[in-house]
Amino acid sequence: MAVNIVKVSSCKQRKDFTAFANRLYKGHPCYVPYLEADEINNFDKTKNVAFDFCDADFFLAYKDGKLVGRVAAIINTKANDYWKTKQVRFGWFDFIDDEEVCDALLSTVEKWGKERGMTTIVGPLGFIDFDPEGMLIEGFDQIATYVGRYNASYYPKHLDRLGFKKEVDSFEYKLKVPDELPEKFTKIAHVVEERMKLHVRKVTYKEIKTERYGQKFFNLINEAYCDLYGYSLLNEKQIDQFVAGYLSMLDYDMLSFIENENGDLVAAAATMPSFAHALQKTNGHLFPTGWYHMLKALYWKRSDTLEMLLVAVKPEYQNKGVNAMLMNDLFTKLKAKGYKWAESNPELEHNQKVQAQWELFEKVRHKHRRIYGKPVE
């Protein structure tokens, strides 16, 4: 039976697209469901401001009358202009272990991109860098994080078979929270604090609003991340959307901000308790009981593992020991709150500045991801 590819257009199809991976991996011990309501908003052109500079369509694959796969075809015009490329992205790519299904989905993206003048297909990538990206190629026995999506081991085998090549890899580390930070680490932190006249800034929810501190944080992210692979600079509307949707939900004791003597933000780290096991209990839905498991993981019975969401240092302050000051503040808080482990989330292989900050910690590289690419045929 041939594979039938259908472009998502109806409300039911949108729901099927959103829910497909949660259904495909239901009950898998390493898979962490995403909240389907959040995904629906992400795919809504009236709610996700990334559509201001992205063109996208979504496709479902059917075989023998059954839903067997999905993929998003995306053109980020801002990223293409910045990096001087003509790339069509494939994202939210999930499918059963079937050559025909995989081939039909990716050839659909290729054709869609070629019709719009694109010369290369790359992925998995989302609209922007804060969407799920990279395909797991090692670490299939490790539980996923909120940011790092899980995929089965047959995914990369199909990409290799089709002639896709490595664009860039990323790694994830599991770090042990030490009983005491290394003396060398704390010494560097104190020296940097004094010599560069820096200080830790504790920020409250009120200050996030009144001082637009969330906007300062994401402007710093733009500065620090702008040279990383495929990065698409966040505009003001996107930043406001992220602040409203995420920063207001975090535990402010688990944020770390470093300012200079003028009160300028020069380094920051955002973390949150691992929601992996709580999300597994929600099955992708906050109602009727999913909200309870999420609140429990956030406030009442936290995991012993923390996710390192974002770490950024202003370019002119990089390679000067500011990371040591940032991590000294952060890991002191982690220990006080009883955390035993920290997950780094994906870090690009060539981002040596970020990976270097873990050198003095006991760690294991437990996941490996890849973004693939090939010319459009």
Image (tube, rainbow, N blue to C red):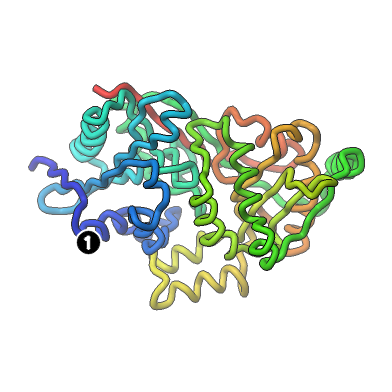
Q: Is residue 207 above or below residue 86?
A: below
Q: Is residue 20 left or right of residue 187?
A: left
Q: Is residue 336 visible?
A: yes
Q: Residue at x 43, y 35 (%)?
A: 78
Q: Is residue 183 visible?
A: no
Q: Give whichever of 215, 288 is nearer the camera.
A: 215
At horizontal 10% and vertical 49% (from top left) the residue drawn is: 64
- Is 247 rendered above or below residue 348? below
Query: Nearest the camera: 282 or 114?
Result: 114
From the image, which quarter does the N terminus lie in?
A: top left
Pinpoint residue 226: horizontal percent, then vertical percent: 57, 34
Residue identified by numbered label 1: 11
Q: Residue at x 75, y 40 (%)?
A: 323
Mark 1, secondary structure of its residue: helix
Left or right: residue 254 compared with residue 148: right
Percent x, y of residue 137: 44, 36
Q: What's the residue type where badge 1 is placed?
A: Cys
Along the line of sight, which residue is nearer the eye, 192 or 217? 217
Percent coordinates x, y for residue 280 in the rendering: 44, 63
Q: Is residue 80 above or below residue 11?
A: above
Q: Going 33% across and 53% down the picture, which residue do you hit?
A: 45
